[in-house]
Image (cartoon, rainbow, N blue to C red):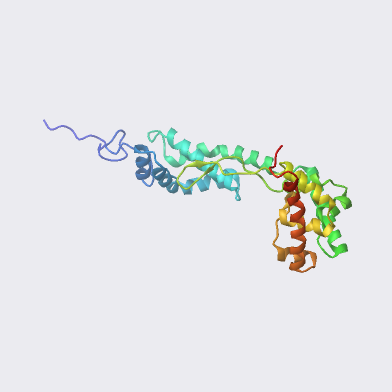
Amino acid sequence: MTPSKPLIDQTLPFAAGGAAGHGKLEADFEPVFSAWKASDTPQTRSALLKQVQPVLHTAVFSYAGSNPSPAIRSQAKLMALKAFHSYDPAKGNMKTHLLSQLRRLQRTSAQSNQIISMPERVSLDRAHLMEAESNLRDRLGRDPSDMEVADHTGLSLKRIGYIRQALTGINDGSILDEEGEVYAPPSSIPGAKDKDDAWAEMIYHDLHDIDRTIMDYTLGSRGVTPLSTAEIANRLGISPGAVSQRKAKIQSLLDERYQLDPFGGD
């Protein structure tokens, strides 16, 4: 008696428990997912992340908006790596699983925006600061020093620095590289004070306003963007040579700290 032919050919990929054994996993993802499953290495993670990139893009766009930050994109990759471990091909396809797991980006994005957004008081102070700088620039015919801005606005130098630094979000989390490896980028915290800072502040207060402006732009003090000698000269309406001479004078005053305390002891 000839055995009856099975209703479902067990060699077909859609057969439950068939030879392919990958359930509902999409054909596009099957090779890279299988390679990663067999050996979890930076290379297989990178290949898998690259293959599912269109899905990650859809999730980020849907859950975090049309202009997501690099931190959100990195977070999406981290979530995807975790989702790979929990994915079961027998229960559904990869795209559905990833979109479900990455839904948490909505909360992550909302928290990120809340942290980075400026408080109303800082926003008002910033507008006040920008207006004062513009008025002083028109009146003096040059960029004002922070001390002049502080006298004009009534804001302290510390507050001026805080307002400027509040405009830049600081990422203290991890970043995912192209191979799916996590690393923590080096970071610095604005506002940290030591003896050198205290000495520099004392020198700053004793300088002429033009020299203060040169010092601000040279050191990038209180959140200003550091400028070259030529750029500073253009802002102040003086020659680059004059800026260089004033820089040398300021540097000599700063170096006196080490003449008084050559070992930098406590």
Q: Camera-side residue: 243 or 4? A: 243
Q: Position of residue 152 (x, y in %)?
A: 88, 52
Q: Residue at x 15, y 32 (%)?
A: 3
Residue found 61% across the figure and 40% down from its top: 172
Identify the image quadrant of residue 10.
top left
Q: Nearer the viewer, residue 155 or 264?
A: 264
Residue 74 x/y as whole percent = 54, 44
Residue 99 in view in this figure: no
240 to 89, vertically: above or below: below
Query: Going 71% across and 63% down the picture, which residue do you hit?
Result: 229
Q: Is residue 85 above or below residue 29?
A: above
Look at the image and tell me in which quarter the N terminus lies: top left
Q: Quadrant of the C terminus?
A: top right
Q: Compare residues 97 and 170 and report the one nearer the observer.
A: 170
The front one of 237 and 10 is: 237
- Decide if residue 151 is on the left or right side of residue 44: right
Residue 244 in view, yes or no:
yes
Count every numbered label the image shows and give the total. 0
How far across and down, in percent of the image, does residue 61 sit?
A: 56, 47
**Vertical placement of 32 versus 86: above or below?**
below
